[in-house]
Image (cartoon, rainbow, N blue to C red):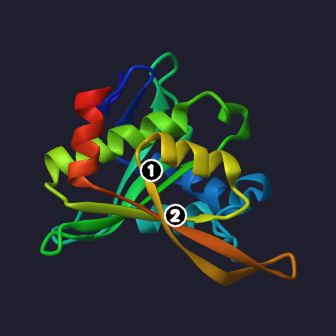
Amino acid sequence: MQSVFMAGENIFLRAVEPEDAAILAACNNDPQVRVSFFTHTPTSIAAQQKRIETFYQPGADYIPFVICPKDTGEGIGITALHRVDLVSRAAVFSVCISDPAHWGKGYGGEATRLMLKYAFDVLNLHRVQLHVWAENKAGIRAYAKAGFRHEGTLREAMVHDGKYCDFHVMGILEGEWRALQQSG
């Protein structure tokens, strides 16, 4: 197994390495993958390699991990905490399985649960939030299952295929997450 940072039942999370640039690029370039992220600008593997060099610097507010199934160890996606604020003890969460062949296997949900454990137990955060496209029903279900609550809707927040789309704001507080851990 590669340098495992956190492990769950079926996956592990590890730091992003320069050779993972293609995984990051797929999240931005693959039409099936990027549809729910509303990215509009393609990226190159070379650009992503340069970006990776900036990760994990002191004071960085972006903490990404590669998602790897335990059985293969291959990188299949990226999960991250964005805008990590250690004073307010808050962050924004994202997860992207970059290969549609791995969708529907529970990897995104497990990565979400591992990241919440990292956020609350390691970083000592109080709040984690996310934005999810209102049409991403599978994502909304997975986030709710992990304990995120619907907090509001950003009406007509982005344009996709010439149509304005709503995004939901979902969040989970440390106490809510700890209660879920005790009950589950």
* 129 with respect to 180 (left or right): right
Query: Which of the two residues, 148 or 65, is positioned nearer the viewer here?
Result: 148
What secondary structure is found at the residue carrying circle 2?
helix
* Residue at which label 1 appears: 79
Q: Residue at x 53, y 33 (%)?
A: 107
Residue at the farthest top position: 71
Q: Residue at x 45, y 33 (%)?
A: 110
Mark 2: amino acid: Gln
Q: Quadrant of residue 163?
A: bottom right
- In the picture, the quarter occupied by the N terminus is top left
Q: Residue at x 66, y 32 (%)?
A: 102
User: Up-down: is 70 above or below 149?
Assistant: above
Q: CA distance from mark 1 to mark 2?
A: 15 Å
State the image coordinates of residue 113 (x, y, percent, origin top left): 38, 39
User: Up-down: is 96 above or below 42?
Assistant: above
State the image coordinates of residue 4 (x, y, percent, origin top left): 29, 31
Q: Is residue 4 visible?
A: no
Q: Residue at x 13, y 55 (%)?
A: 124
Query: Which of the two residues, 152 or 88, is positioned nearer the viewer here?
Result: 152
Looking at the image, how many numbered discs can be counted on the residues? 2
* 157 with respect to 65 (left or right): right
* Residue at which label 2 appears: 48
* 64 with respect to 182 (left or right): right
Mark 1: amino acid: Thr
Label ID, residue 6 = none
Q: Earlier in the sequence, mark 1 or mark 2?
A: 2
Query: Which of the two residues, 38 or 22, is positioned nearer the viewer here?
Result: 38
What secondary structure is found at the residue carrying circle 1?
strand
User: Up-down: is 134 above or below 115?
Assistant: below
